Image: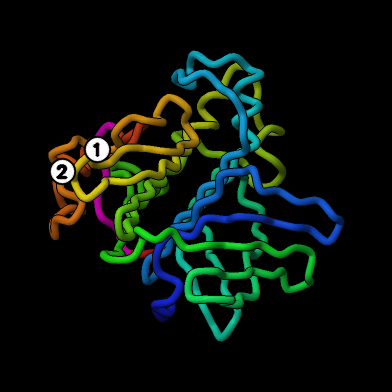
């Protein structure tokens, strides 16, 4: 699979989605970080939740979290058609295609339209997302079915990691939840933030895990521009809130 065109690289913030039904949404926090092949996408509806670990949230709060979305994988572009091959998903795998028709109104403003015209989305590139653009796919060292990725573009990062338990296919996440195991199904992490050129590195601005917002993804002394970032043992051993006991290992792109 070829690299995506350079004009897609960076971080795109969704300003609006409008459906043919007339429904619109400009309130959900949506960020799509695109590298030459890997991508990650985070979608958090507005909700006032306590900044607590999942284990300390009540069932109502957990159901609110189940409305979040996020995914990561590999992007393919052919002409004006863009397809995101999801290899990690916050919601249950639906086996459906994520594909849209893309039109650049300007170099920094992108319109995505459904192939059946059911919706259109307005995306704008964040100015500080130009620059170094790279990513790494990861697997748990002791479990190849548990995956993650760390992607960076300019001043931004997005870390995505699959949940600690297996989830059945299809439906909506809330339909799979029960009081006994609800928090385990919500351990999929997507954490997005900035490193501010090393001034306040790895600060999480949005996360599917409420407790993580405002906290560092990685220790402040880990250089986000380092060439050996993805092989740094400190990164591989501790990356993420629910890091595997034996850490991560670098893996081929899916």
Q: Quadrant of the C terminus?
A: bottom left
Q: Can residue 146 be seen in this view?
A: no
In the image, residue 61 above or below residue 194: above
Task: Look at the image and say whether residue 116 sits in the magenta stretch.
Answer: no
Q: Mark 1 points at which residue?
A: 218
In the image, residue 57 above or below residue 26: above
> Where in the figure is residue 40, as x and y percent of width and height?
45, 55
Residue most extreme to the bottom: 79
SS for callout 2: loop
SS for callout 1: loop
At 33% from the left and 60% from the top, the residue drawn is 153
Which mark, residue 222?
2
Q: In this view, does 17 lie to the left or right of 116?
A: left
Q: Is residue 69 visible?
A: yes
Mark 2 and 1 residues: CB-CB less than 8 Å, in contact?
Answer: yes
In the image, residue 110 above or below residue 179: below
Dot 2 surroundings within 10 Å: few (below 14), some, or many (20 or more)? some
Name the image quarter holding residue 152: bottom left
In-front residue for pair 232/87: 232
At 31% from the left and 38% from the top, the residue drawn is 203
> Where in the figure is residue 139, as x and y percent of width and height?
33, 49
Name the image quarter holding residue 38: bottom left
At 70% from the left and 48% from the top, the residue drawn is 25
Dot 1 surroundings within 10 Å: few (below 14), some, or many (20 or more)? some
> Where in the figure is residue 10, as x and y percent of width and height?
40, 64
Name the image quarter holding residue 245: top left
Q: Magenta residues?
A: 245-252
């Amino acid at each position: 699979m070829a690299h995506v065109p350079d004009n897609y690289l960076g971080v795109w913030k969704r300003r609006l989605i409008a459906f043919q039904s007339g429904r619109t949404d400009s309130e959900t926090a949506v960020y799509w970080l695109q590298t030459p092949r890997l991508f990650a996408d985070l979608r958090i509806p507005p909700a006032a939740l306590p900044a607590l670990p999942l284990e300390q949230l009540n069932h109502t709060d957990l159901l609110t979290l189940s409305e979040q979305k996020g995914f990561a994988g590999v992007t393919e572009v052919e002409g004006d058609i863009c397809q995101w091959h999801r290899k990690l998903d916050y919601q249950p795998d639906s086996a459906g295609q994520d594909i849209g028709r893309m039109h650049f109104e300007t170099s920094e403003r992108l319109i995505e339209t459904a192939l059946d015209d059911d919706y259109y989305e307005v995306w704008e590139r964040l100015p500080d997302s130009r620059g170094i653009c790279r990513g790494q796919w990861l697997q748990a060292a002791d479990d190849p079915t548990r995956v993650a990725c760390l992607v960076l573009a300019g001043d931004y990062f997005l870390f995505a990691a699959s949940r600690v338990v297996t989830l059945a296919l299809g439906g909506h996440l809330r339909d799979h939840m029960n009081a006994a195991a609800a928090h385990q199904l919500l351990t999929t992490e997507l954490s997005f933030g900035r490193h501010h050129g090393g001034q306040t590195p790895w600060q999480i601005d949005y996360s599917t895990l409420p407790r993580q917002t405002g906290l560092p993804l990685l220790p402040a002394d880990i250089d986000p521009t380092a060439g050996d970032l993805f092989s740094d043992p400190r990164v591989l051993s501790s990356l993420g809130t629910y890091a595997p006991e034996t850490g991560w290992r670098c893996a081929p792109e899916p």
